[in-house]
Image (cartoon, grey):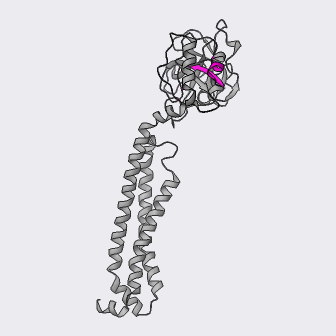
């Protein structure tokens, strides 16, 4: 039974085999790239690789950038071994030059047995959110290693087809067993379990820090303004308007807080890159996050200054003079 027959039997639109799925640390090999000298001065680089069947890239939705995919030209008796590389490998090893026809070989080999026939899009190699890493692909037509994963594309809910897929595998061979199954969504979710836990913990501590900072600013500013009640009463007794007094107090307080925020932002900008590895889908110096913290603390400072200043401004100036 071919993969096409399997796809028809299982009721899926496409099916393919692969030795590793995206975002899964698996096999790598020491490889020499013709015309490329590694920065460390060694002859080889450690490259991740996968063995794929025909139709794998169409099934996974990985685009072909240039060249061709595996096909009949890659028969097992063909000369050499055709390989595909991802865009990260093309950028690193060949820059802006055409990689088609370039050669590679296993470290220590005498012959350049691997020829690049195409470039495909990048997918996560080890984990989600990583910087694209160089990777290349072998074809099952020329490699005897048997891939461990069957990937399928469905038109509907992939989870609903699980029983049909297991039955189709059983019909294919009684000696083949399904050890695990799941969707790419669940696989990616599992790879994000640790970062999610770290993100939740960091979010909780960040909110607590923001709350404590806000309460601290509010308490200090409120106390400071309350101590100036007599001063504010004297100003109003001498002719200062209530609104002018409130604006003066708020302006002074917010000015001091803004100066503190500038210093805090500078320190945060130095520290933030150290936690970049815990973040996914957001940069360590995310402007929205920094802007939100600034707006929140500035608002807290304004409120802490405005309320006691307004209360003092509404008091009778004569009473303020008596208590001065």
Residue 33: percent from the left, percent from the top? Answer: 58, 20
| Outermost top residue | 77
| Outermost left residue | 323
Quadrant of the frame with the N terminus: top right
Magenta region, residue range: 6-23
* Front-most of residues 258 and 194: 194
- Residue 60 lies left or right of residue 315; in this view the side is right
Give the total number of marks visible in the rendering.
0
* Front-most of residues 304 and 253: 304
Q: Within the image, what quadrant is residue 150 found in?
A: top right
Residue 72: percent from the left, percent from the top? Answer: 70, 13
Q: Within the image, what quadrant is residue 116 found in?
A: top right
Does the magenta portion include 43? no
Query: Is residue 32 visible to the viewer in this orientation of the structure?
Result: no
Query: Is residue 137 visible to the viewer in this orientation of the structure?
Result: yes
Residue 146: percent from the left, percent from the top? Answer: 54, 13
* Front-most of residues 117 and 242: 242
Q: Determine the residue positioned at 52% across, 10% down.
A: 174
- Residue 119 lies left or right of residue 291; in this view the side is right
Q: Is residue 117 above or below residue 317?
A: above
């Amino acid at each position: 039974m071919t993969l096409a027959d399997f796809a028809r039997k299982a009721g899926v639109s496409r099916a393919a085999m692969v030795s590793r799925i995206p975002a899964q640390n698996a096999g790598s090999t020491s490889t020499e790239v013709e015309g490329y000298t590694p920065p460390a001065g060694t002859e080889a680089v450690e490259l991740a690789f996968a063995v794929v069947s025909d139709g794998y890239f169409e099934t996974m939705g990985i685009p072909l950038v240039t060249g061709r995919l595996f096909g009949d030209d890659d028969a097992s008796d063909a000369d050499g071994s055709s390989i595909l590389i991802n865009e990260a490998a093309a950028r690193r090893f060949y820059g802006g030059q055409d990689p088609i026809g370039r050669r590679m070989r296993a470290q220590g080999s005498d012959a350049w047995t691997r020829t690049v026939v195409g470039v495909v899009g990048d997918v996560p190699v080890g984990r989600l959110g990583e910087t694209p890493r160089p990777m290349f692909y072998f074809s099952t037509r020329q490699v005897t290693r048997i891939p461990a994963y069957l990937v399928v594309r469905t038109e509907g809910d992939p989870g609903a087809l699980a029983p049909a897929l297991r039955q189709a595998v059983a019909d294919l061979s009684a000696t083949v067993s399904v050890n695990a199954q799941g969707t790419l969504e669940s696989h990616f979710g599992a790879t994000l379990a640790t970062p999610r836990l770290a993100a939740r913990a960091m979010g909780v501590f960040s909110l607590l820090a923001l709350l404590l900072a806000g309460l601290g600013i509010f308490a200090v500013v409120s106390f400071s303004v309350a101590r100036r009640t007599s001063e504010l009463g004297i100003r109003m007794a001498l002719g200062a308007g209530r609104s002018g007094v409130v604006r003066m107090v708020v302006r002074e307080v917010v000015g001091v807080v803004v100066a503190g925020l500038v210093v805090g932002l500078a320190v945060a900008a130095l520290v933030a890159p150290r936690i970049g590895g815990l973040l996914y889908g957001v940069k360590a110096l995310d402007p929205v996050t920094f802007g939100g913290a600034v707006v929140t603390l500035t608002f807290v400072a304004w409120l802490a200054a405005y309320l006691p200043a307004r209360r003092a401004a509404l008091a009778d100036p004569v009473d303020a003079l008596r208590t001065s």
